[in-house]
Amino acid sequence: MGTPPPAYRPGPGSALEVDRDLYSRLASATGRRERVHGFTVPVRSGRAWEVPAGHLCRIVAPEGPQVGDLNIWSRHDPRERMWAARTRQMQAAHVTVFDRLWSTLPFLRPLVTITADSLSWYGADGEGGRVHDLLGTRCDPYVNRLLAGEDFDFHCHSNLTRAVLPYGLTEFDVHDVLNVFQCTGLNDEDRYFMKACPARPGDYIEFFAELDLLMAMSTCPGGDLSVDLWGPDAREPLEVCRPLAVEVYRPAAELLEGWSPPARADYAGLHGLHRPEWSGGDR
């Protein structure tokens, strides 16, 4: 029997159909872009930053393998944020070049499109592991308390919470992540597994901002995930923690020819509800 086809398949003109020439042009013309922002996120910490629409954002592993937990919001309305579950359905559980990260309802539009990925060669390994994971989510101190019986304040959820506070956001705004550089899969028992990160010094993934964005990332306290974090073989993984770098670029205007920011979903209904009709005068 063959592999079943994906459930979410686009029709002609769908937003799932990516203009590959446009995004390939943006990725390849590295000499026709201007770096406008850059910084390093130290180990076991988080940072938030803005990316204007039409700009490129590159995340780099400068010293080698390290997992980063990424959140994305619309800069102008944080209720619109990355929707990991729908992205898994419409793109893949592990993303790479030309995949898009989609936003929540009622917006449902691409927040970013992946333009470059130095780990695109990895594919699926012999155990079914793949990189840039949307299957799992961020580590958090609540689960840590359940599994390890102790508190730790530098899980990705906490790092992201601290990172977004200057933007008026809180823990309730932190959402399911893209695990950048993380290698994961499902085992024969259909249970989630994590493997050592395959990133090498200088590996990167690059996103094109379709809207004005707020992005935030945590350098995972598990580092490259080569050390068990919980269970009988768990030990302190600080020795396998490394920083990540962020670079934001403005591409030359001519490279954006043919691009425009995506409109929100055009569903105009009221979910079958009707507006109430008042009697007895104006209300």
Image: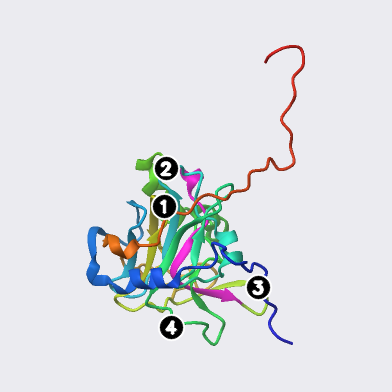
Q: CA distance from mark 3 to mark 1?
A: 27 Å
Q: Locate the C terminus by quadrant.
A: top right
Q: Nearer the viewer, residue 230 or 166?
A: 166
Write down the region rendered in magenta.
170-186
What type is the residue that disc 4 sits on?
Trp
Image vertical order of residue 72 relative to residue 76, above or below:
below
Q: Which mark is residue 52?
A: none
Residue receiving disc 2: 76
What type is the residue that disc 3 sits on?
Pro
- Given this view, does label 4 or label 1 mark the residue nearer the observer? 1
Residue 204, position as x, y percentages in the image: 35, 72
Residue 135 found in image quarter: bottom right
User: On the picture, is 41 further left or further right than 194?
Assistant: left
| Residue drawn at 53 percent across, 49 percent down | 264
Q: Earlier in the sequence, mark 2 or mark 4?
A: 2
- Given this view, does label 1 or label 2 mark the residue nearer the observer? 1
Image vertical order of residue 75 relative to residue 25, above or below:
above
Circle 1 — which element? loop
Residue receiving disc 3: 6
Does residue 123 show up magenta in the picture? no
Q: Locate the N terminus by quadrant.
A: bottom right
Circle 2 packing at 10 Å, graded few (<14), some (14-19), many (20+), is: few
- Given this view, does label 3 or label 4 mark the residue nearer the observer? 3
Q: CA distance from mark 3 to mark 4?
A: 22 Å
Circle 2 — which element? loop
Residue receiving disc 1: 211
Residue 83, position as x, y percentages in the image: 54, 56
